[in-house]
Amino acid sequence: MTQGERVWDYRHWMFEYAQCGCHSENVMANRNWIGCGGLVAFVAVSALALAGNAWAADVNALAESCAACHGKDGASTDPDMPIIGGYSAKYLTDSLTNYKNKARPCPSVKFPAGPHKGDSTDMCAIAGKLSDADLKSIAVFLAAKPFVRARQTADAAKAARGKQIQDAHCKKCHEDGGSSPDDDAGILAGQWMPYVRHTFEEFSSGQRPIPKKMKPKFQELTKDDVDALVNYFGNFK
Ligand code: HEC
Ligand code: HEC
């Protein structure tokens, strides 16, 4: 490989990087340096280091903003805030895109902590501020974290009944009590019960679009069935 080819390669790579929308200022500054020829390798290495840091800082700052409600690494300790660490990247991306497009209801919520403590917002407003690149990077970040099950008390008898309903109607898409991120359907086992109850209400009232094949299963559920299912998911420790 000649020096010229290497320069082109490097520029091409940086151009692609710049297109991702990440810190093009640094990229432009470094591009001018390339004219110095002999410094190419050094610039490439330092630019990589810079790029790496810039990327990490961005996603960490983003994760910090989510942590105000969803807890560190998405392991929410607040019963009204879903645990989102450990969900699949696909489910996270899809959900955030749905909020962004207002295809999912956005109940108003107050920041319980952080610099905006007490201010009202909602997930549509939050997702609406994320670029597509931000959205993907936070989804990948959270998907790499463990799903930390909620510490809560469920009714054992209701949970046992809930298991039967789950096995008969939900298992196909929510495997192992809804504990597998690979279902791309959220994680239900160990999720906060008030949040799960709330999603049932949103699905039944038609506010949240319900997956086509989940709909008939949902329509068959009585109020007691829902209560049993909520306790079943909540009973995972
Ligand atoms: C002010 C509090 C708050 C902040 C900040 C916040 N969220 Fe949320 N988030 C919520 C609430 C409340 C819900 C449940 C909304 C609902 O019922 O649809 C939610 C729901 C979600 C869901 C859907 C969960 C599911 O099981 O379907 C995802 C994904 C999500 N948030 C991701 C994020 C990400 C990523 C960030 C940071 C960029 C973030 N949230 C910041 C409060 C917040
Ligand atoms: C044909 C597949 C399928 C079946 C059957 C099914 N679901 Fe789902 N479920 C999904 C998908 C896909 C999603 C994600 C929907 C979305 O994009 O918001 C989901 C989402 C959910 C959610 C919301 C998760 C969250 O984090 O917000 C709950 C709760 C749920 N399902 C419960 C059930 C229960 C209980 C049953 C059985 C009575 C059931 N589902 C049957 C596919 C299915």
Image (spheres, rainbow, N blue to C red):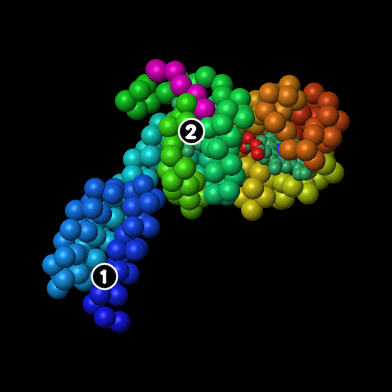
Quarter of the picture containing the C terminus is top right
Q: Find disc 1 in the rendering and name its residue.
A: 7
Q: Is residue 36 above or below residue 204?
A: below
Is mark 1 in CB contact (under 8 Å) with mark 2? no
- Which residues lie in the magenta part? 118-124
Residue in the picture at 73% in, 38% down: 211
Is the CB–ligand 1 distance for label 2 below 8 Å?
A: yes
- Asked which secondary structure carries label 1, the reply is helix
Q: Which one is earlier in the sequence, the residue at label 1 or at label 2? A: 1
158 inside magenta stretch: no
Q: Whole-percent x and y of residue 71?
A: 44, 36
Inspect the image, locate mark 2, and give the three-letter code of the amino acid beneath it: Ala
Q: Is residue 100 above or below residue 7?
A: above
Q: Whole-percent x and y of residue 236?
A: 65, 42
Q: Whole-percent x and y of residue 136?
A: 48, 47
Is the CB–ligand 1 distance for label 1 below 8 Å?
A: no
Q: Find disc 2 in the rendering and name its residue.
A: 127
